[in-house]
Amino acid sequence: MAKARRFSHRTRVTLWEAYARSTIEHRCLDPRTWATIISQIEGIKHIYGFMNKFMSLGFENRVRINAIDVIAKRLDNLSRQLIIVDVGSGPGDSLKAIWRRLTNSYIVAIDPSISLLSTACNNVLCDRVVGVAENLPIRRHGADIVTSFYASRDFQSLSDALASMISVTRRGLVIGDIFLPKHPVKKLLVKAWVCRIVPMLAMLLAGKYWKNYKGLCVTIKDWCDVQDVKTYLKQLSKRFGKQLIVESHSYVFGGLGYVAAFVEKESISGHNWS
């Protein structure tokens, strides 16, 4: 009987891992949808931070800060300058949070939009680089930490982007975003908020730009749960030969959250980035 129970447990784990892998690897945006979403974000960059506070019920920055704090606690040497690559930086809201928590850092802000990057490095020591998450313009082990906040839903290929992020990091990575919980009631609540209530809220607060927020509903279609990303990162770590310790945390019925992954044994190679 005990043997049967152990076998059943292993089966469930395998099925869960297979489901997470299928969910992540099938998450792709076609080029036209991707370009439309980028254009919509460019159109609201002047009210991006203001609206995000309302949309997230005030949790937007807490997700960033908590995730960065988790990473900071794992770093054994904060005295030397850290190279941090922020993927999907947009207008730079996340850079400010990173800079406040990790003041001795040099940030590389990466985004496919020149328009969004134009304001990204205001009052922050960083470089702006036009690029996409799926093919980061950073050499292997070229960054201490890779971060991405509220951008992973917009990646053209989520699996390729996660693989690229793991490849370039030496010490860890953090992903924070809106997520779609598996629990049917929670999923319904999150979808209703993003697809119905947020556009109506934008009509009051964002004026003529409210239609740009309808794209949010497109980005959560067939989107994943925070646990899917956590499970998939563990699988990727084996492929890259890195021992990753992965943590996650959810907020607001699982509609917001972050995944933090740490390299258990830091790469012995030095920085080699371009």
Image (cartoon, rainbow, N blue to C red):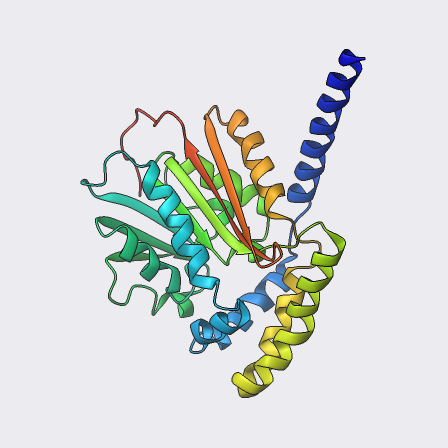
Q: In terms of image quadrants, where is residue 40? A: bottom right
Q: Is residue 171 left or right of residue 160?
A: left
Residue 61 locus on image (x, y percent): 42, 62
**266 or 63, nearer to the observer:** 63
**274 or 158, nearer to the observer:** 158
Q: Is residue 250 above or below residue 121?
A: above
Residue at x 71%, y 49% (from the top left corner): 182
**78 or 45, nearer to the observer:** 78
**Which image quarter holds the N terminus?**
top right
Residue at x 40%, y 67% (from the top left corner): 91
Answer yes or no: is residue 29 visible. yes
Q: Is residue 105 left or right of residue 23?
A: left
Residue at x 59%, y 48% (from the top left corner): 157
Q: Is residue 246 left or right of residue 93?
A: right
Residue 175 locus on image (x, y percent): 48, 48
Answer yes or no: is residue 142 visible. no
